[in-house]
Image: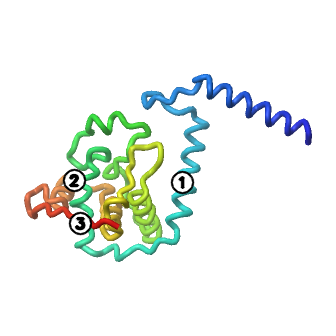
Amino acid sequence: MKSFIIASLALLLIGVIALGSGAYNIAATEKHWLITEKIIEWVRISSIKSRAKNLQAPSLNDKNLLLAGAEHYASMCTECHSAPGHELTELSQGLYPQAPIFYKQEPTTDAEEKVESIKTYFWVIKNGLKMTAMPAWGHSHDDETIWAMAIFVDKLKGMTTEQYDKLTGSDNTHDHNHSHSHE
């Protein structure tokens, strides 16, 4: 047991010296070490899952929520996450880790999986993510607005340019009326 403790402390000391020496490049232009990437991904998924599991999602079939989510996404999210028919922005190209491009993802078909996905999106949109460019919109938007955005993000998966333009008003079918509630 004593040799295990000594070996562990020695490894910890070597790690501290290596990281403190600048051996780990923190630049956004360099990928994480594979082990670092895997640990961050595991912690991120576990953390979000444990915090989102007890959330109660509103009706996912509310057309007004979907339209509100589309409006907010179009005005707040496309700079990083893009949209159907849009090119990646200079900002999004410089992000590391890269922001997910939702419309390129496969739609969720399983009802239970869809609800869990939307709850995850809600939690991330509301709370943001450390060490990414994802802000915590819960400081400036109420829960109903955030649920609307989460529902839209899930609906965005596999969406065409025409569908996106119709929902966001990019086809000039409705005006942008953007207001926020502060909690």
Q: Looking at the picture, which amino acid does disc 2 mark? A: Ser
Q: How many marks?
A: 3
Mark 2 / mark 1, whichever is N-terminal: 1
The residue positioned 40% from the left and 60% from the top of the image is 126
- Nearest the camera: 72 or 183? 183
Mark 2 / mark 3, whichever is N-terminal: 3
The residue positioned 35% from the left and 61% from the top of the image is 154
Q: Secondary structure at mark 3?
A: helix
Relative placement, left or right, of 129 versus 5 is left
Q: Which mark is residue 45?
A: 1
Q: Which mark is residue 68?
A: 3
What residue is pinned by disc 2? 75
The residue positioned 73% from the left and 34% from the top of the image is 12
Q: Is residue 60 above or below residue 141?
A: below
Q: Secondary structure at mark 2?
A: helix
Q: In which quadrant will I find the N terminus?
A: top right
Q: Residues within 10 Å of mark 2 (few under 14, many from 20)?
A: few
Label 3 to label 1: alpha-carbon separation:
27 Å
Label 2 to label 3: alpha-carbon separation:
11 Å
**Where residue 65 sits: x, y (%)?**
27, 70
Q: Looking at the picture, which amino acid does disc 1 mark? A: Ile
**Where residue 182 sits: x, y (%)?**
31, 65
Q: Which mark is residue 95?
A: none
Q: Secondary structure at mark 1?
A: helix
**Picture quarter containing residue 68?**
bottom left
**Of circles 2 and 1, which is in front?**
2
Q: Is residue 61 above or below residue 101?
A: below
Label 2 to label 1: alpha-carbon separation:
27 Å
**Picture quarter containing residue 34?**
top right
